[in-house]
Amino acid sequence: MRTRRDAPSIEAAKKLAKILDAAVGYLLGETDRADLFKGPAMLQRLQDILNLPSKEKECLLMTVDHFIKAAKINLT
């Protein structure tokens, strides 16, 4: 069993993911998609969103949802 002490750091996981051109979540077995949040910029954005206060996070996610819906409509 791995302990917190011998677990790889987030930085090590990010470096390994970059070398392997895969997402950190993919390496951790959290997703089957190797391309999910591959870039560190997307990971940082997600972390920034998760750190927002609840009300601001909710507003931002609603805006993103509306933007995605509009983009899908424009593609058809």
Image (cartoon, rainbow, N blue to C red):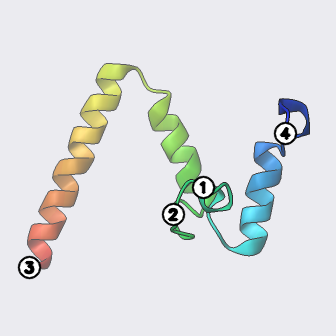
From the image, tell me which residue sits under label 2. Answer: 36
Instruction: Quadrant for the C terminus, please.
Output: bottom left
Q: Residue at x 79, y 59 (%)?
A: 15
Residue 2: which disc? 4
Q: Earlier in the sequence, mark 3 or mark 2?
A: 2
Examine the rendered structure and indicate whether residue 8 appears above or below residue 55.
below
Q: Earlier in the sequence, mark 1 or mark 4?
A: 4
Extreme residue toward the bottom, this view: 76
Amino acid beneath label 4: Arg
Residue 8: which disc? none
For the residue pair 4 and 54, the one nearer the viewer reads as 4
Quarter-wise, where is residue 52 in the image?
top left
Amino acid beneath label 1: Gly
Q: Earlier in the sequence, mark 4 or mark 2?
A: 4
For the residue pair 20 and 45, the one nearer the viewer reads as 20
Q: Earlier in the sequence, mark 4 or mark 3?
A: 4
From the image, tell me which residue sits under label 1. Answer: 25
> Label 1: few (<14), some or many (≥20) within 10 Å?
some
Examine the rendered structure and indicate whether residue 54 appears above or below residue 18.
above
> Label 3: few (<14), some or many (≥20) within 10 Å?
few
Amino acid beneath label 2: Leu
Secondary element at image label 1: helix
